[in-house]
Image: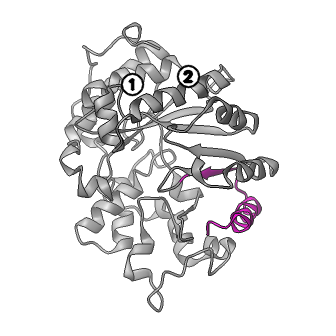
Amino acid sequence: MADFEGLKSIVSEAKGLGARSVVVIGGGEPTLYPNFRELIVYIDSLGLVPMIFSNTLLMTKELAGFLYEHNASVMGKLDSLRPEVQDYLAGKEGASAAIGKGLSNLIEAGFSEEREAGVLRLGVSFVSNKMNLGEIEEIWHFCRKNRIFPNMEILTPTGRANDELADKLLTAGEIRTYKMKLLEIDREYYGYDWLPYTPITASGCLQHLYSLYINIEGNVRPCAPAKLDEHPFFWVDGEYPYNVNKMSLKEVHASELFSYVRNIDRVLEGRCSACEHLDECIGCRGYAYSVGINKGLGPLEALRMECQQCFKEKLEEKPQKGIANFAKPEEVEK
């Protein structure tokens, strides 16, 4: 799967299926891939947008400039503005300083320059948890002031988060409280208004409806946390068949399983089934899948279960009249 010619073939197939961007992401740092730059050039040459998820530890000025020139967008990493917390969550001493330098290089290259309304080329991904709960508002202001998309996610109970960071998971009440605080901040200071129930704060995730995730082994998933390839239910002769080394991306896309996934909004259960916001929110299917599998549900049942993060009904029962005591933007340094 890591063969460069194979990757080019996958990208070309994706283009033929109507893709508009290619997200370069991985279990490790994608910029370490030997043919990383050639891949970015190829994606750009097809008229697709290269979308890079990077921890920015290795984001030099030269690399930032290269990515800017090739129409890439970059999603960096910023789990905390406190070095000791960021280093712990990254699992690497000195990560905070390197991340800060990398983000500065991206900003200097022009990634946060003002563009048409709603168009951003730089974002930072940060995962809300008990270690950074007290600084979420500060991180939010930092992003908004620097025209950085705040890709704030909720810690998903899978992988290291499930094995080592389970005690850092937030309660539903904590999630509701900080989301409403951030909504108040956006309305008050930045002129943004958004649906507070979506799994990514200020942004819905409809990934299951229009995209495919391919891991390093070539296995295709709806998204990274929805690890269908690890469940025996889908195996044929002991192997997961939806692999780009075994069938074309077009065949995977047209398969019964992935046709089902692309229409998951039609079979959602619980509160999600009749929600009036389905055009912009189907909940976090990856989170639902992880929680459902941990509870012993079948994979398809887990995939369509109601969103485990939504507080819509509770909010409507007790409307929020506003939340005070949040940080002001002038208190956050650029």
58 vs 312, nearest the viewer? 58
Percent coordinates x, y for residue 124 in the rendering: 48, 34
120 vs 161, nearest the viewer? 161
Q: Residue at x 38, y 64 (%)?
A: 304
The part of the chain drawn in magenta is 1-25
- What amino acid is found at the position of numbered circle 2 in the picture? Arg
Give the vertical position of 167 relative to 262 (above or below).
above
State which quadrant residue 176 falls in.
Answer: top left
Query: In this rendering, would 124 be left or right of 331?
Result: right
- What amino acid is found at the position of numbered circle 1 in the picture? Ile
Query: In this rendering, would 167 be left or right of 303?
Result: left
In the image, residue 77 lies in the stretch drawn in magenta: no
Q: Which residue is mark 1?
A: 139
Q: Residue at x 74, y 52 (%)?
A: 38
Q: Which mark is residue 147?
A: 2
Cα distance between the residues tagged 1 and 2: 12 Å
Classify the position of the N terminus by image quarter: bottom right
State which quadrant residue 244 falls in.
Answer: bottom right
Q: Residue furthest bottom?
A: 237
Mark 1 is surrounded, within 10 Å at the Cα level, by few (under 14), some (14 to 19) or many (20 or more) other residues, namely: many
Query: In this rendering, would 149 be left or right of 285?
Result: right
| Marks 1,2: beta carbons within 8 A | no
Percent coordinates x, y for residue 224 in the rendering: 46, 59
Comes first in the chain, label 1 or label 2: 1
Give the vertical position of 33 relative to 87 (above or below).
below
